[in-house]
Image: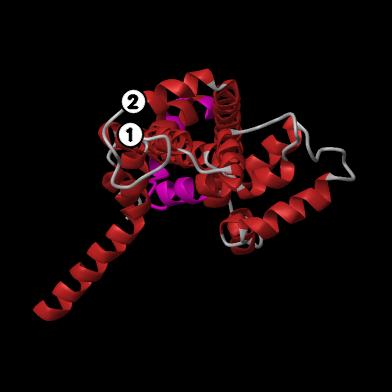
Amino acid sequence: MKALGKLRAAIAFLSLVYILIPLLVTIPASFTSASYPSFPPHGFSLQWYSKLLERPEFVEAFWNSVQFAFLAAFFSVLLGTLGAIAIAKYDIPGKSYLVSLLTSPLTVPQLVLGIALLVYFTPLLLAGTPTGLLIAHIVICVPYVVRFVLTGLSGFDYTLERAAAILGASPLTVFRRVTLPLIRPAILSGALFSFLTSFDNVTVSLFMISPGMRTLPLEIFSNMQDAYSPIVASVSSVVIIISVVLILLLEKIHGVGRLLGSSH
């Protein structure tokens, strides 16, 4: 048994190292003082980060990504939370099939999903528009909210809602004062994953974007097609740091382990 435990620990460690290798290469390479990407970096310099502010296409793409991510997270939380509550609370015919439908974008390859959305949106004149891009991002973000909120509701004690109603609370008050506080960690987790998914998306955005509308991941992708330079590494490092900060913030406020374990 000890040998099996050590084997599992070794596999987990190697898997973690394999996942972190791109980060361990990209971030140090962004601090190089050379005019070309190198690892290990030649010298230490912050010049590539300062040059980001001199590249308006990156600054504009960054704010575009932030705006789309916020909107996608907002609408995903709104739709996904209401959908998850309806599924968990009410006896809906074909409930399991509905859950599979709502979470299906998690299992469909994003390349296939991007092509399908492009084919569907083109006759509706939504392809290549901000509205079409936002709807596409909501489609790929809603499953995270549904999954997390359903997990949060799996151990929910509905007698608390009935007790509040018996004491005279209106349905809106029951939701606001009883239901919402108990599932808030799950909602925040879904919002976080929705934001990160939208902010970092390339595949689906590639089919929905227009030449005059860029997001930061697509700007990075476009620059890598021409020539890989240290400034691309610095932009990628900024995206990585933002993702890590958001996850650490969630861990600080609620605790990711407690959040994921709150349903058991």
Quadrant of image for the N terminus: bottom left
Counting from the top left corner in percent of width and height, residue 184 is at 40, 34
**What secondary structure is the magenta-colored segment mainly?**
helix
Residue 130: say if magenta.
no
- Residue behind mark 1: 31
Q: Label 1's element?
A: loop
Query: With 250 as the anchor, is 61 left or right in this view?
Result: right
Write down the quadrant of residue 242 in the picture. Answer: top left
Q: Which mark is residue 43?
A: none
Q: Amino acid at mark 2?
A: Leu
**The magenta stretch spans which residues?**
147-172
Residue in view at x 74 percent, y 29 percent: 212
- Numbered marks: total: 2
Counting from the top left corner in percent of width and height, residue 122 is at 85, 45
Outermost residue, right direction?
Answer: 123
Q: Are marks 1 and 2 in contact (CB under 8 Å)?
A: yes
Can residue 43 be spotted in the picture?
Answer: yes
